[in-house]
Image (cartoon, rainbow, N blue to C red):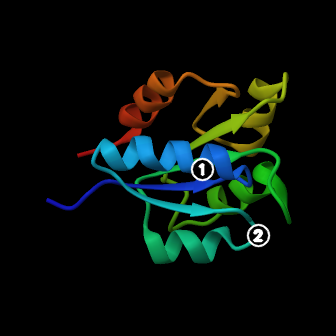
Amino acid sequence: MSKKKILIFDDDKVILEVITIIFEEGGYEVEISETSHDIIQKVSQFQPDVILMDNWIPNIGGVEATKLLKSNEEFKKIPVIYITANSDITALAESAQADDYIAKPFNLDDLEEKVAKYMKD
């Protein structure tokens, strides 16, 4: 059985390391990116099952990157979980057309539950 794949867009190296370790220990294949302008290219190469998207990310930002993805026929079905410390996360996630969101600082168990919810067999 092939591993479920998670693609994480975040420019915080500490968060990337922690999330990567947690999900790899959970049996997932993880790929990370510190920029989001090349989201379509990254997604088409890696074919993730779920995407974790930070709001404050270099080049085009989480909202624009998510919109790009969601406007692409081939990839719009991939669930995007928006991660940000912004107080207006609900509105941001909606405007980005994200499937779900989790606020920073987040509880790792909550994050794992959210991801699991979107992993389809």
Quadrant of residue 5 within the rendered picture: bottom left
Outermost residue toward the left in this view: 1
Residue topped by disc 2: 37
Left-right relation of 49 to 66: left
User: Where does the image place residue 100, in percent across and percent down from the top left?
Assistant: 58, 32
Does label 2 or label 1 sit earlier along the sequence?
Answer: 1
Label 2: which secondary element: loop
User: Where does the image place residue 78, in percent across and percent down from the top left?
Assistant: 48, 53
Quadrant containing the N terminus is bottom left
Residue 47 seen in this snapshot? yes
Residue at (75, 25) in percent of width and height: 90
Query: Crowding at label 1, few (<14), some or many (≥20) Cα neighbours within 10 Å?
Result: some
Residue at (40, 54) in percent of width and height: 49
Determine the CA span between mark 2 and mark 1: 18 Å
Kind of residue at disc 2: His
Above-or-below relation of 54 to 71? above
Query: Crowding at label 2, few (<14), some or many (≥20) Cα neighbours within 10 Å?
Result: some
Left-right relation of 76 to 103: left
Q: Quick check: marks 2 and 1 in contact, CB under 8 Å?
A: no
Residue at (64, 61) in percent of width and height: 69
User: Where does the image place residue 32, in percent across and percent down from the top left?
Assistant: 56, 61
Left-right relation of 22 to 98: left
Residue topped by disc 1: 16
Residue at (74, 55) in percent of width and height: 11
Residue 79 seen in this snapshot? no
User: Where does the image place residue 10, in percent across and percent down from the top left?
Assistant: 69, 52
Above-or-below relation of 66 to 35? above
Kind of residue at disc 1: Leu
User: Disc 2 or disc 1, which is closer to the eye?
Assistant: 1
Label 1: which secondary element: helix
